[in-house]
Amino acid sequence: MTSSSSSASSSSYSSSKPWIYDVFLSFRGEDTHKNFTDHLYFALKDAGINTFRDDNGLRRGEDISTELLQAIQKSRISVIVFSRNYANSRWCLEELVKIMECRRSCRQLVFPIFYDVDPSDVRKQTGSFAEAFAGHEEMFVLQTDKGKVLHDIFKSF
């Protein structure tokens, strides 16, 4: 996992809030990592914005790490890069649930970016998002309370 280092003085949030990161980037690596997300990450870093992104990724069968969930919680802002395959990833969806929890409980700012996906596909769960949810429903993720939470979350974008 990689994050840029910036001094506490470069962040307007560091002195008054318990944030470690200014920005947490949530993205589907195979969709955007080597192009859009890299450009965004380095632009933020070059501007002195302390940004967290998971460079290691999660391998199939692994649970989302406690460290990753803590990075979300310790970030002032979350930027979600919704791409065609974002909702196919159980880990991206778990990140999203945690981000929205932090939005409510910690007043974290959340900014969605729609990368090669129509915002209405995310909001209405159509197109690739409908297909992803259908696949998850066959498994187990959306059969729990998290499933209802996720359906409600997407409608907020």
Image (cartoon, grey):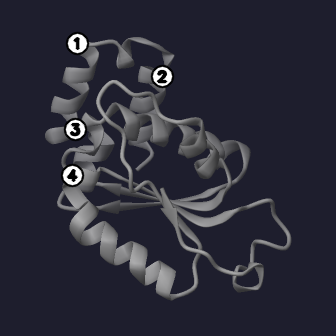
Tell which circle, 1 or 4, labels the residue nearer the N-terminal end. 4
Tell which circle, 4 or 3, labels the residue nearer the N-terminal end. 4
Q: CA distance from mark 3 to mark 1?
A: 14 Å
Q: Amino acid at mark 2?
A: Lys
Q: Amino acid at mark 1?
A: Glu
Residue 127, x across and y down, in percent: 14, 40
Q: CA distance from mark 4 to mark 3?
A: 16 Å
Residue 29, x across and y down, in percent: 28, 53
Q: Which mark is residue 146?
A: 2
Query: Label 3: few (<14), some or many (≥20) within 10 Å?
Result: many
Which element carries disc 1, helix, strand or loop?
Answer: helix
* Residue under the point 21% across and 31% down: 132
Query: Label 2: few (<14), some or many (≥20) within 10 Å?
Result: some
Residue 16, x across and y down, in percent: 85, 70
Q: Amino acid at mark 3?
A: Phe
Dot in front, 4 or 3:
4
Task: Verify CB contact (< 8 Å) between mark 1 and mark 4.
Answer: no
Q: Seen in the image, is 48 located left or right of residue 43?
A: right
Task: Verify CB contact (< 8 Å) between mark 4 and mark 3.
Answer: no
> Which residue lies under the disc numbered 1?
138
Q: Which mark is residue 129?
A: 3
